Image: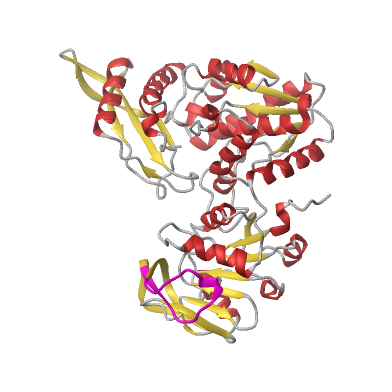
Amino acid sequence: MKRYNDYHQELILILDFGSQYTQLIARKVRELGVYCEIYPYNHSMDAMKAMNPRGIILSGGPASINEKNAPLCDKGVFDLGVPVLGICYGLQLLSRVFGGKVEKAPKREFGKAHLYVGTKDKFLDGIKDGDIVWMSHSDKVLTMPRGFVTLARSDNSPHAAIRNKEATIYGVQFHPEVHHTPKGKRILKNFLYKICRLKGLFSPKSFVELATEKIREESQGEKVICALSGGVDSSVVAALIHRAIGDNLQCIFVNNGVLRKNEAEEVIAAYREVLHLNLKYVNAEDRFLKALKGIKDPERKRKVIGRLFIKIFEEEAGRNGSARFLAQGTLYPDVIESVSAKGPSATIKSHHNVGGLPKRMKMKLIEPLRELFKDEVRIVGRELGVPENIVNRQPFPGPGLAIRIIGDVNRERLEILKEADSIIRQEVEHNPAFKHIWQSFAILIPVKTVGVMGDERTYANVIALRVVESEDAMTADWARLPYATLDTTARRIINEVPGVNRVVYDISSKPPSTIEWE
């Protein structure tokens, strides 16, 4: 039964045309208290009508609207009777639909620009002449679409913000979703609250309530097995499902052999003594290492680990009254990076709990966090009372150290990486001065270099350090750690870890690189 605080009553649909910023639109909308979902630009009209959205946002995209096969949404989007906001490519698309003319600009506009308001409108409330916006386009609207008026311009875009005279259809040439547009969030808030006339029903509390009901409906009173890793995602999933079904939840922690130093002991203590969950420990270290033997390709590693995980859980399900449901901590970035189902974006890599799952599973998946970003999951965890030391824990990939060992995974190489990783955790992750760090970890590179230790020549392994700052893992920048911290960490690794004589620091950002190396 629907309730007043069901945030789906205020659903905003985001149609994705392939922009690198589409996920930022979703995050900003949710931060403003409104639930939204991303779908491909060609999402069916019948499906959209059935969802009864309160507004639609058309994302930007890399294509030109004048290309032969330019991505186009169903024109019925503009006849649904709900407000529409086109961003960058979305502006150009609606201009074309309504008879405007879009051509390649004689001067491309990338980076900061100044906005000048020409027509007052509640959509631009709080925006003043000269306010900075972020542009990223080579096409621009030259002839206004029929029935539209110009609200604002920039130096190179005469129609930087437009509005339909009769309907609540808006378009902006700039990107209000990026932090480079300082008042962009204010513009989005104006669209949501003053144009779409929403109340803002989405919050961690409302998510917990609705997710709890959904879990009860999905599980149908049967047992659910929850895969625990010790990380934020699986911890929040366990707390959420326990809230919904109580003793029908059976948590299982599998030691896959590629965990960090002492991690198995730490995880068991946290879940049994702090969260008081019904936990079963399965030591499958030998099985995973045997399955990984000789595999160097990272995609194969992920799939091998994912499939073996499922096999083990299915075995455990048979020992637990034939449980039919498996709960996982899949997050939105996992889904986006693994498949292109949400829009015309490229597959980056498979995640063990998305692309690594077999097509035919004996158990049905329950993934209550599938549409959330990491920062939203942390907020939900706090709402559920998950301890801060777990909520604030750095992300750790499902395939564990297997994808931080470039090349073969064996016990010898694992021990080297575990020791190096333990040191960087001590120096960075567990240091209160670096709470802002998103992830900090070590990578074992499959090369050896010459060194000198105790006046003797060495030929030993290289450890790379990866430390990044981020908000949601969709984008990330390398952390400018103090030289003293880098120096201490490198010296400790070289002196304390046998088989290592060199440490390097990764100073690449995402994009173009990913956070993990594999």
Determine the residue positioned at 66% across, 59% down: 199
What residue appears at the point 51 percent right and 55 percent down from the top-left corner?
A: 24
Residue 184 appears anywhere in the view: yes
**Left or right placement of residue 397 versus residue 6 in this view:** left
Residue 420, position as x, y percentages in the image: 37, 22
Q: Is residue 63 left or right of residue 216?
A: left
Q: Which residue occupies the foreground of this view, 297 or 369? A: 369
Query: Image quarter for residue 38?
Result: bottom right
Can residue 117 be found in the magenta stretch?
Answer: yes
Instruction: Please tell me which residue lies in front, 468 or 256.
Output: 468
**Quarter of the figure with residue 34:** bottom right
Among all residues in the image, which is located at the extreme front?
126
Give above or below for 169 relative to 101: above
- Name the spot of residue 283 as percent of width and height, x first: 61, 15
- Asked which quadrant contains residue 236, the reply is top right
Please check the rendered image and state whether residue 188 is part of the magenta-colored stretch, yes or no: no
Residue 68 locus on image (x, y percent): 54, 74
In the rendered structure, the answer to whether residue 74 lies left or right of residue 258 reads right
**Magenta segment range?**
113-130
